[in-house]
Image (tube, coloured by chain):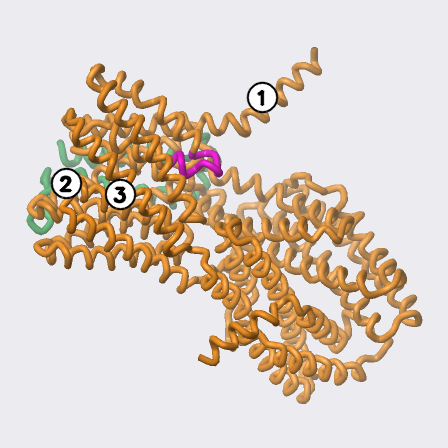
Amino acid sequence: MLREWSLAGATFPAITGLFVLSLLVLWLVDKLIGRMGVYRYVWHPSLFKLCLFVCIYSLSAFWVYQ
Amino acid sequence: MSVNLASIKQALASWAKQEGLTLLFIIQGLIAIFLTLWLAMRLELPQPAVACITVIIVMQPQSGQVLVKGAYRFLGTIIGCVAMLVLVALVAQERVLFLLVVAIWIGLCAAGAMAFRDYRSYAFVLAGYTATLIGIPAVQNPDAAFMMAVWRLLEIGLGIVCASVISACLLPQTSTKAMQQSVKKRFGEFTAFVLENLAEPDNQQQYEHSMLLFATQAVGWENLRNVSSIEDYVSKQRKQRLARLNQEFMQLTSRYAGLHSLLQRVRLHYDNDITTAIDSCLAIVKDTIAPYRGSSLSSQQAKQVADIIATKQENLRLQIRAESARMTVLLSEQQKLDFDTACELIYRLFDEMRSYCDTQASLLTEQHPYEHESTRFQTKLNPVGALITGLRTSFIVLTFGSVWIATAWPSGNNFAMVAIAISAIVTTTPNPARSARQITLGTFIACLLGSLVNLVVLPQIDGFALLCFALAPVYVMGFYLSTQPKFAGYGMGLLIFFTFGAVPLNPAVFDPQLVINNYISLVLAQAMVAVILTVIIPADNGYVWSRLNKEMRLQIPTLFKPKQAQRRQRFESQTRDLLSQCYGFAGDSPEQYKNLIRMSFAVQIIGHAIIEMEETEQQLLSEKSVNHDWLQQKEILKQYVTALFERPNAMQQGILLEQLATMMDWLRPQISTLSRFESSPPKQLLSHLHVIRNTVLDSHLFNLSSVTSREGGNYAA
């Protein structure tokens, strides 16, 4: 995986793009577990979501910086 | 001792509800700003101040609002960035042409923000604001435009992310909670209003005030519902039911408006007999709802209330029949009609209360059939208002840009930039002129404090912690002011422009001349924007008022348009939306506003009657028992109503009243005296016509003496 992506000649760090992708993944996961009713057992939903995002984002960053 | 403890507990609880929340908001704001500042310094962004200003613009007491605002603002920022890069690439060489294009772009954004007054407006505001922020410095050195755009995008993005995370995770005040509380309180508020108004029917001021409050609440509710359904899964699962609840609430208030105006008339014209009869029917409603006066109602309790009302409905029906039988001999034809109509309204009001409680009870479960019904709150676009705002903003851009070019003032770029940004930001506030005036004064104080911190304090200190201590006092004050509705503008100006001058660049620069020059341009720009908004093109001019009045009247002819899905929902929501649109500048011209309120009540009452008349007709059509003559008569009625509401004048009013009288005379022989109200469509139709007639008779309504001459002239021209 390249550490920099090029968009019409302008390079930017891959983790910027991954940030957006992680947000999309988070959105999907959030929808899924919401439908499963997981949030009924969660004390602090937004904190839970934030942690979930950190996990997803970090995992994807490991993929770049192996 | 125990009494003392209880009172202390109570005092603590009430403190936590008010001052406690303000304190929490201030703490959240401080943490969000300093976190952003630290990250911006750590990530070596060139202008940490831009990131901090974003936090200030996004920060709200409710976390859901921050999330939604943040998301839309980020979207707006990206759009603004892209638009500006294209413009810089195309016309940066020619400063005048560039200004013209920027003026058009920002005018469009401001018009968009004005047209969509919900969360979408943030995207428009920020698209305009970012465009200025990037565009004006870029025109001086176009080579750096791309990098500058990237930096601003990152800075704004950082601010939005920090504000959202802090507000959502650190002791969040969720919009869902606010929503739930308001659901609980609403029925109690309505019953309190009804009981008070029935006890004191002549207190017109109180009545108008409460009805207005309900209308603006309905619009605010819709916003809250959208925001909380994005924030939280619990609300998301109940989104449609909450919409339905709001819709039913609006119907309740419309129904009550109809009953109120009828009762007023009956009390004015008739003797005791009929009023006692009506009162004895009303007493059942009053007794039933009295226990819930002003109380908060959970969803379980709502179920019980719905059941109680359902059993009492039968009593009411019997009571109405008994009174009606007793009255038959005593009353004239006209009085009987009034009595029947009043009873019908009371019965329907009661039924709608039951149905409201029923919907509230449906919120208890996760799944419910109501959830699959779609109810939409439709806002009313105000194209003229949007156009005026757009033109005004473009005008400001051109004026300030020309001053900058003509004087070649070194701080002219700042001067133009700030003026444009502020006029974009105040667009969405209820009263732009007042906000701009407040922000100007806030900016002035910010200048003094900012210069003090930047020139005297910052050179003495070292390290991030001390920087925070130097900035914190002003931020605390600013955040406190921004939580007070009356002083929100001062707080905003203070926070934004203090940050602008006091937060150091990265790396920090000590340049007193630059700071003072910047601040002079800021205050000048602010003051000029305030003057332009107040004097030259105020938002609350007579033309806008007459436009709004007309829009309100046109709600009635729109009802007749064929094939409308959710006609009733559209009607209820748009009348409220129109009313709340001008709530902001109501204080500046109370007389105009009063006219609009009166018109909106009449429109609600007549609209309701028309909708229900057509429902009855549909029912007859399905039974194939509708009379051909009636349909013809109704076509004529439609034409006359449309004509009157499009161009009110005494002649049209007379024609319409005559038509109504004809129709009522035609209906009367169809009614057998024995038939009961609920099983006699002609009787129902007659009572709807009667309601329309009573409302149209109100000569103050169309303000006929003045409106006819002025608007007549307009149409002739």
Q: Is residue B4 left or right of residue B239?
A: right
Which of the two residues, B619 or B509, is positioned nearer the viewer here? B509
Which of marks 1 and 3 precedes in the sequence? 1
Up-down relation of residue B403 to residue B687 (above or below): above
Can I make out residue A52 in this image? no
State the quadrant of the C terminus of chain B.
bottom left
In the figure, the shade used to draw chain A is: green
Residue found at x 31% / y 18%: B469
In the figure, the shade used to draw chain B is: orange
**Residue designated by label 2:** B410
State the quadrant of the N terminus of chain B.
top right
| Secondary structure, magenta segment, majority class | helix
Label 1 to label 2, Cα distance in Å? Answer: 54 Å
Check disc 1 and give the amino acid type: Leu
Magenta stretch containing residue B485, yes or no?
yes
Instruction: Specify few, some or many for label 1: CA neighbours under 10 Å numbering under 14, 14-19, or 20 or more.
Output: few
**In front: label 1 or label 2:** 2
Q: Is residue B662 left or right of residue B122?
A: right
**Residue designated by label 3:** B418
> Residue B509: x percent and y percent?
14, 26
**Residue designated by label 1:** B12
Residue found at x 51% / y 73%: B711
Residue segment shown in magenta: B482-492
Residue B270 found in image quarter: bottom right
